[in-house]
Image (cartoon, coloured by chain):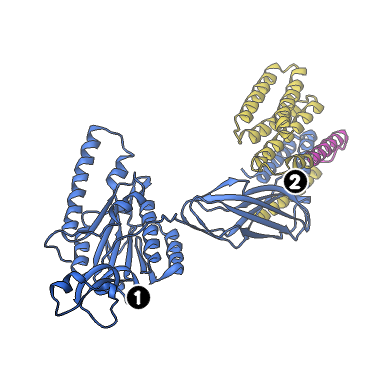
Amino acid sequence: MTRFLRFVCPILSVGLLAAGYFLSGLDWPAVGLLVVGVLWIVGLALRWDWVSPLGMFAAFGAAALGLFLDLSPVLLISGALFALLAWDLAEFSIRLRLASPEDDVATLEKSHLLRLVAVVLAGGLLSAFALSLRLKPSFEWTIILMFFAVWGIGRVVDWLLTKQS
Amino acid sequence: MNRTFFLALLIFLLLFLGLATIRPSIVALALPLVLYLLAGLWRLPEQVHLRAERSLSAERVKTGDDVSVTLKVSNSGSALEEVLLEDQIPGGLEVVEGSARRLIALPAGGSITWTYTLRGRRGYYGLKKVQATVCEHLGLVRLEQGLPTDGQLYIIPPVLRLRRVAIQPRRTRIFSGTIPAKQGGSGVEFFDVREYQQGDSPRWINWRLTARHPQNVYSNEFEQERAADVGLILDGRKRTNDFGERSIFENSVLATAALADTFLNTGNRVGLLFYGRQVTWTMPGYGKIQSERILHDLSRLEPGDSHNFSELYVPRHLFPSRSQLVLVSPLISEDYDMLAALRMSGYHVLVVSPDPVSFEADALAETHANLLARRIVQLQRAVLLRRLCATGIHVVDWDTSEPFEKIAKRDLEQRMVLPRGVLR
């Protein structure tokens, strides 16, 4: 299942992002994204483990650029969400390679996919909700909120990295 | 790159871009990533309390035999969604059945037991640790923990059964054995004739001699057979044993194990001196316990070069004077002086020498230069062996392409006939 999905997700991600650009008349960036998608799939097939983070980075970059250019946010955020799924599944399949034939891989896959889909769906809904808000905070409030966001996320990451080491 | 770090970098970039361009939609793009990060944090196991127990089907096996390893890992902490358990198998062992690795979810209070089969080459192996790598379900954080276990495995060399090894030390012990003691008494082999003494069996009377000298009665004397002190010396010098990737040392170990077993089975007292990186000494002893001790020690030995002695060094105080020494060594020219000195000190020396020339030549291409080089080295070796024989040392030249049993049957079962004029 993971093996199948880790190829499908990059295709959907790049396809949705390219569609976002293509529908707004930006043909060449769309073609460029499709080329990135092909390279991503080839890298996955050749088991280049470094290709997924690069693909995700490219997909989120393309989505951010598209949002800056006021392209369709639904297509762009959906494309970015599928990139997140693709990145996660690629990493998960690397971990599954270490399983022995006796291991119950199907159950591990099932529970992982359920949780992943739940997290990504929740993330998508949260993004949609954030986009639907029409708040107009002042620049000062935006700076203060951003500062707290960056500080909070920085603390979380620091804690995770410390725990790991 | 670390996954958490990568995710954080992407989030920060998106937030920065959103702020710089004053686009809330770009900030909204970062929200799924933030949620993903927090989800990983939420499911992170607080503390890992794993315990591993190991049992082996045998702690001592012969080379080529299989050993079943059963591992039980119990979780006394919180539930773990993804645990990779990996038994740390030392080099030299290989898994032939099952797997030394498991990827599982382990509930709180749960445990997993699994078995796999190992096989390996001669050696001593400590199986001391199971590595556990715990991930939360998104794999953002990996906690690694070494779980200590008890376990050791001796893979001893195969022991070939030899019928007998003919040795003739100048001194024997008082216990009966199979070594001719050069003294008259009860035995099997004819030794001498003497005047009949009270208590002699009538069957021992030498009727032919008595008929020739009717004034006396003569009886036969037989050679006493006794146990002897045998000192086995195994040469573990790297320079004599290793040839690039290949090593002839395993052949030396095989021969030493077979000789030790044979000498001990015939009631002798046997000690083992290993000469490699350092000198290792197995105290002399008798019987099966000593055989086990020697096999255990043989299983640990690896060739190495001594920093103290560049040449073969045999500490003589370890071996009783005039006892039997058996050196198992591929030999190099510099060894002659040491061996000759041992012989001059009164030791009876037997050298079993796995032939390094043919061993190394098997791995080389048959070019003209190689053939010429082989011929030169073979001649040098032949000269060395001949010089040793002339000193009264019994040398068994073993071409390792032939089984040791065959060589032993041909060259070790018969007593050595020393050349005329050689010190006995």
Q: Earlier in the sequence, mark 1 or mark 2?
A: 2
Query: Which label belongs to residue B305?
Result: none
Q: Which chain is yellow?
A: A
Do callouts 1 and 2 mark residues in contact (Cβ within 8 Å)?
no
Q: CA distance from mark 1 to mark 2?
A: 72 Å
Range drawn in magenta? A113-139
| Magenta-drawn stretch, dominant element (helix, strand or loop) | helix
Quadrant of the rendering where the C terminus of chain B is positioned: bottom left
Q: Quadrant of residue A117?
A: top right
Q: Quadrant of residue B75?
A: bottom right
Mark 1 highlights which residue?
A: B175
Circle 2 packing at 10 Å, graded few (<14), some (14-19), many (20+), is many
In-image side of B249 versus B214 (left or right): right
Q: Is residue A134 magenta?
A: yes
Give the number of callouts.
Answer: 2
Q: Is residue B103 above or below residue B321?
A: above
Disc 1 residue type (three-letter)? Phe
Q: Is residue B124 above or below residue B400?
A: below
Q: Is residue B321 visible?
A: no
Q: Nearer the viewer, residue B387 or A119?
A: B387
Quadrant of the rendering where the N terminus of chain B is positioned: top right
Per the rendering, the colour in which chain B appears is: blue
Disc 2 residue type (three-letter)? His
Residue A95 in the image, given as x and y percentages of width and height = 66, 42
Q: Is residue B306 above or below residue A19?
A: below
* Secondary structure type for disc 2: loop
* Secondary structure type for disc 1: loop
Mark 2 highlights which residue?
A: B137
| Residue displayed at 34% across by 39% down | B363
Residue A33 in the image, given as x and y percentages of width and height = 68, 23
Residue B227 in the image, given as x and y percentages of width and height = 33, 71
Residue A17 in the image, given as x and y percentages of width and height = 74, 25
